[in-house]
Image (cartoon, rainbow, N blue to C red):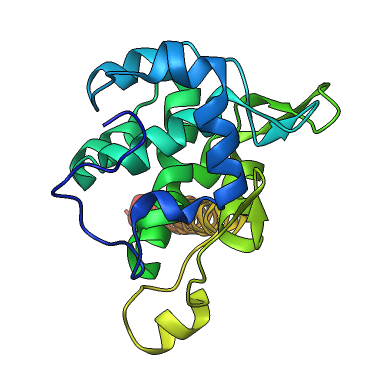
Amino acid sequence: MANRTVSDARNIHGTNPQYLLEKIIRSRIYESLYWKEDCFGLTAESLIDKADQLTCIGGQYGNQKPTEFLCLTLKLLQLQPEKEIIIDFIRNEDSKYLRALGAFYFRLIGDSVEIYKYLEPLLYDFRKLRRRLPDGAYDIIHMDEFIDSLLRDERVCDTIMPRILKRQVLEENEELEPRVSFLEDELEQEALAAKKKEEENKSRSRSRSSSRVSNLCIIYIYLVIIKIFNFLFFSL
């Protein structure tokens, strides 16, 4: 089964899962040394170890050579593991490249609602990722930038992203709850804290005011008692 999809695989977006990568890229992956030596015989479980060894993301570089990241993506498309396994990849906080691989693969095979549901939380992951550039050099991006590109861009890592519905459409159809951004959530928390502090200040102010009134009442009563006492004393 060196280059074949598993026999019980389901079509994704109406096609063989491997066909989600363009034919020319698949051919280059099949011919690459990494595919022949490191991807042969991999299972969904053993692929985790290979993903842990990744040092960058990216598509093709140099003389149209596929990155290891792209090779492992094709291997996942070939194996078509259960979605629960890929979701575990995405939720894995220990290996950022395993998470990036899982997110990239899930963007290729998931439906619109699932993609927003599982990928949007990664917008709060700000860890650095090395990215292999077409000229073979590297640059640095952050996980949230990579996820944002998966949700917005038509092509990522030299791979055409399947079309997904816009978030606004899914919200209007009540398939997704409106998203609260990290900044909006932070501002809301600050507003609540300010309101709570204001209420506490008002409460303390009322307490001090009540205390002053009580003290004045006591003084007034004391003066009245003294006045009555003096009246009685001098009347005798």
37 or 171, which lies in front?
37
- The mark total stands at 0
Image spot of residue 183 (x, y percent)? 62, 54
Q: Position of residue 33 (x, y in %)?
A: 55, 15
Residue drawn at 31 percent across, 40 percent down: 4
Q: Is residue 184 left or right of residue 11?
A: right
Could you tell me which quadrant the N terminus lies in?
top left
Direction from residue 31 to residue 178 in the image, left or right: left
Q: Quadrant of residue 113?
A: bottom left
Name the outermost residue toward the left.
8
Res. 135 in view: yes
Q: Nearer the viewer, residue 221 or 44?
A: 44
* Coordinates of residue 3 in the picture (x, y in percent): 36, 35
Name the quadrant containing residue 49. top left
Where is residue 71 shown, x and y percent of the image?
Answer: 50, 30
Residue farthest toward the bottom in the current orientation of the protein: 172
In the image, residue 66 above or below residue 15 = above
Residue at 55% across, 23% down: 68
Can residue 221 be seen in the rendering of this structure?
no
Given residues 164 and 172, the one toward you in this image is 164
Q: Along the line of sight, which residue is nearer the eye, 60 or 168?
A: 60
Q: Relative to residue 156, is residue 4 drawn left or right?
A: left
User: Which residue is located at x 63 percent, y 62 percent?
Assistant: 152
